Amino acid sequence: MRALIPFRVLAVIIFVLAWLAAFIQAPRPTDVRFVFMPPRASPTAESLHSASMDLPRPTPSAHASSVTTLPDGALLVAWFAGAREGASDVGIEMARVRAGTVEATWTSLTREQLQGMVQRVIRSLGNPVVWVDAQGLVNMHVVSVSYGGWSGSAINHLVSSDGGVTWQSARRLVVSPFFNLSTLVRTQPVAMANGTWGLPAYHEFIEKHALFLHLRADGAVGSAERMQKYEGGWLQPAVAALSPRAAIALLRSASRSTPFIGVNRSTDGGATWSMQAALDIPNPDASVALLRLCDGTLLLAANPTRGGRGTLQLFTSDDDGTTWASSRVIERDDSGEFSYPCLAESADGVIHLTYTWRRQGIRLCSFGRGWLRDDGSTAPAIGGAP
């Protein structure tokens, strides 16, 4: 009688197959194009000074905010909050803000709710990404952890018709055919001209690398393109379209050997990506935010230090990301953490920045391009104790 394969050996074989599956490429999309608006002048907000506010704190810990504009002009901000990152009580909090006033706050999603919707074991939630589709519906991609830490995670897609108060549908994105583990999301998707979406994502198990997921019109994954990498691990790509076919992605470095912001570019609508020289801006293993403003300027929010996340600063580029100029310093305190920024621009040209404030809460800053262009080396920070 043949000996049975020991359970531990079988488990190792299965996990190796799951790892190999991350390298299997789905058919690449053809003739894909980004939704691209030519540069235009902002209708207002050219000289708006900065204003900042802290969102309500219902829990001891808050992190990883995301901000988008709603069809009625209000802002929708989402973040994960609980006793601590990875705790079982972590849920997704939301706030609706208009003209510097918080109109409403609520717990938008708990792990128990998502567990019931997708019929899978979920231990914790994290990294919500909110955005509004062409029909005006609020969409959210959120990371769920079923087993282990972030390496045992998956991406879920939810749709709401009431601004994120309730969710009418939820699905777990299938990126890998084996267990579908260790795929996460952190930054905003980009709209495609054919009505689909491109979602920046990343993989953490065994090897850390960035992905660009082409989502079909129904929200399912059509293909997954792996971005090229330098030495070490690279995470959390932030993508901005530069033309109907070209885009730039800025990446978080997870390696001490290359502690700078990584760069990938695409010239075929995100079907393929090529590695470029890293930016001369340090990155202390921290998420970055990237936004193309209505006038064509690229805006970057990052922690430009070799260690720690105590400085949060803005940078601008007028040549599609080839060179970058220092702009405003938002926060500076080596003993604190000001991290995981997210950027949005409303229809009136006002720029909005949300970020983690000391892991205790979420701060929202709003400003115009006139304020943004001032010399960041002499500009006072707009942070400080709430």
Image (spheres, helix red, strand yellow):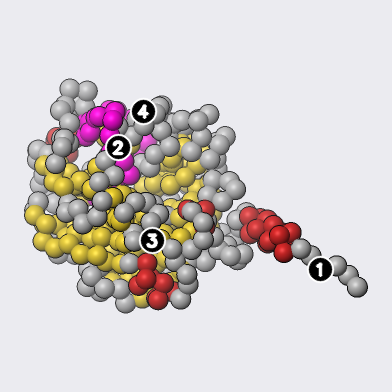
Relative to 368, 37 lies left or right: right
Q: Earlier in the sequence, mark 4 or mark 1?
A: 1
At horizontal 47% and vertical 53% (from top left) the residue drawn is: 150
Q: Which of marks 3 and 1 is nearer the N terminus?
A: 1
Q: Name the residue under label 3.
A: 88
Q: Which of marks 3 and 2 is in front?
A: 3
User: Which amino acid does the dot numbered 2 rest on?
Assistant: Glu
Can you tell which mark lies on residue 337?
2
Count residues near mark 4 (Cα–Cα under 10 Å), then give few for <14, some for 14-19, many for 20+.
some
Res 196 quadrant in image:
bottom left
At horizontal 51% and vertical 61% (from top left) the residue drawn is: 147
Marks 2/4: CA–CA distance:
12 Å
Marks 4/1: CA–CA distance:
54 Å
Can you tell which mark lies on residue 4?
1
Q: Which of marks 2 and 4 is nearer the N terminus?
A: 4
Q: Name the residue under label 4.
A: 305
Of 261 and 118, the residue lying toward us: 118
Q: What stretch is highlighted in magenta?
A: 317-344
Marks 3/1: CA–CA distance:
37 Å
Q: Earlier in the sequence, mark 3 or mark 2?
A: 3
Marks 3/2: CA–CA distance:
23 Å
Where is the C terminus found, in terms of image quarters? top left
User: Which amino acid does the dot numbered 4 rest on?
Assistant: Thr
Of 211 and 106, the residue lying toward us: 106
Q: Which of marks 1 and 2 is nearer the N terminus?
A: 1
Res 307 quadrant in image:
top left
